[in-house]
Amino acid sequence: MAKVHLYVAAACAVVLALATPALAGDPDMLQDVCPADYASPVKLNGFACKANFSADDFFFDGLRNPGNTNNPAGSVVTAANVEKFPGVNTLGVSMARIDYAPGGQNPPHTHPRATEIIFVLEGTLEVGFITTANALFTKTVTKGDVFVFPRGLVHFQQNRGHGPAAVVAAFNSQLQGTQAIAMTLFGAVPPVPSDILAKAFRISSGEVDHIKANFAPK
């Protein structure tokens, strides 16, 4: 009996090991389509499926026009993810349009649930990512170029041209998640204690408070 239990335990371990890669990204879909039902009271990992849907659920026109870049970063991200585009629910994909004013920046950030690949629509951008070994990889990209940012790594884009720039980004997740590094650390609610940030950045608590003021809710 003990040997049977051992075999069962070993078999379970193999099944779990084989299943692990499937858990690295969005879960596999279990039906053809599952447009998100935003009104459903059911809470789960993703969105419940609509009972009735149409072709409109699989259509999104929000990336047609440039976004408003009149903000401190000089950039704006227009998302086509499951929160705005119900048809991508369970499909493991999403997109975004990013527009940049001259000198505009998509600040250093990460996507914990997705790799990102961009296609440059117009302009000249300096793009890059930083590995966990603190190695920086950068490239200047222009219209028609493609660049990829590995999942979970800190990355950025900066408009280096004299005019506006724009890219279309694609993600291998219906909701990639975004953590902007500066906002995460200096704009968290409740705030990260200033002495913790002061020690981490090797600056004074007063300097931390000054930086925090720049990220306070308006």
Image (cartoon, rainbow, N blue to C red):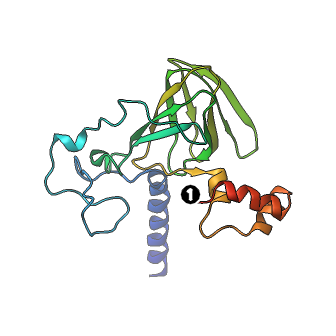
The spot of residue 47 in percent (x, y) is 31, 59
User: Compared to 14, does 26 lie above or below?
Assistant: above
Residue at 86 percent of width and 57 percent of height: 202
| Residue ranking furthest to the bottom | 1
The spot of residue 155 in percent (x, y) is 63, 40
The spot of residue 191 in percent (x, y) is 65, 68
User: Compared to 217, does 157 lie above or below?
Assistant: above
Residue at 50 percent of width and 58 percent of height: 17
Q: Quadrant of the C terminus?
A: bottom right
User: Compared to 211, does 91 lie above or below?
Assistant: above
Residue at 41 percent of width and 42 percent of height: 79
Left/right placement of residue 59 relative to residue 140 reads left
Which three-letter amino acid code belongs to the residue tagged 1?
A: Lys
Label 1: element kind: loop
Q: Which residue is mark 1?
A: 218
- Nearer-the-camera pick, 119 or 91: 119
- Nearer-the-camera pick, 82 or 4: 82
Mark 1 packing: few (<14 Cα in 10 Å), some, or many (20+)? Answer: few
Q: Quadrant of the N terminus?
A: bottom left
Q: Quadrant of residue 71?
A: top right
Q: Quadrant of residue 91?
A: top left
- Nearer-the-camera pick, 13 or 130: 130
